[in-house]
Image (cartoon, grey):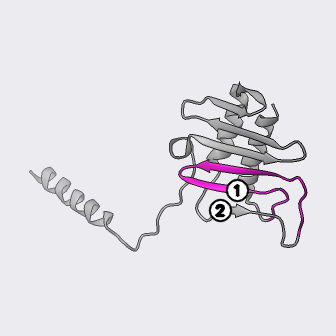
Amino acid sequence: MRLLLLLTAVLAVLIAGCGDAEQEPAKTTVNESTALPLTVEREGGVAGIQQRLVVRRDGTGTITSPREPARELSTAETAAVRRALRELVFDGLDERYGPPDGTMVADGIDYAFTAGGRTIVVQEMAEDVPEALGELKRAAGEAMNG
C-alpha cells in the first residue's frame, strides 16, 4: 500500500512538471528521424547546372539532372551527407545566406536544402554561413560531383 502511495505521489509530481510554460523549448536538431528525406537542389554556373539530390529515410540516395541519367548514391556518399545533416540545428538559421552587399557573382552555383519542413538557400560566395550548414553543403557537393 505504501509503495502504491509513493508511486502515485511521484507520478503526480511528474505530471505537474510537464505543464511548465516558462521552460525554454528544446533546440531542434535535424537528424534522420526529423529531417529525412533531405532534398538538395544545386543550380547555376557557366554550364547551367541543375541537380537534385535526395536522401531517403531508408538510407538510400539519388541524384537526378535533366541532362544526365539518375544515379544512386554510394553508401559512403549517403553516409557523409547524413552525418553532416545530423550536426545541423535549424533553429536560428536564416532562410537565405548570400554574398556581401554589393558583391556581384557571375555564374554562381546556389544550393537549396529542404529538410524537416524548412528550406535554406546558400548562394555562391555566401558570408556568415554556419559551420554545420557549410559542412552539409560540402558533403552534398562532393556527392553530386560523384
At numbered mark 2, what does the secondary structure look like: helix, strand or loop? loop
Q: Residues within 10 Å of mark 2 (few under 14, many from 20)?
A: few
Residue for point 66% across, 64% down: 94
Q: Nearer the viewer, residue 80 or 15?
A: 80
The residues tagged by marks 1 and 2 sit, at their Cα atoms, a distance apart of: 6 Å
Q: Nearer the viewer, residue 143 or 41?
A: 41
What's the mark number on residue 95?
2
Q: Is residue 65 magenta?
A: no
Residue for point 76% across, 60% down: 129
Q: Nearer the viewer, residue 55 or 77?
A: 55
Residue for point 46% across, 69% down: 24
- What amino acid is labelled 2 in the image? Glu
Q: Is residue 146 above or below residue 44?
A: above
The residue furthest left is 1
Residue for point 66% across, 56% down: 120
Quarter of the view holding residue 142: top right
Magenta stretch in the rendered image: 103-127
Mark 1 touches mark 2? (CB < 8 Å): yes
What's the mark number on residue 121?
1
Q: Is residue 118 above or below residue 75?
A: below
Residue 74 point in image, percent of width and height: 71, 26
Q: Is residue 113 magenta?
A: yes
Residue 111 point in image, percent of width and height: 74, 50
Instruction: Say whether residue 5 is left or right of residue 40.
Output: left
Residue 78 point in image, percent of width and height: 68, 33
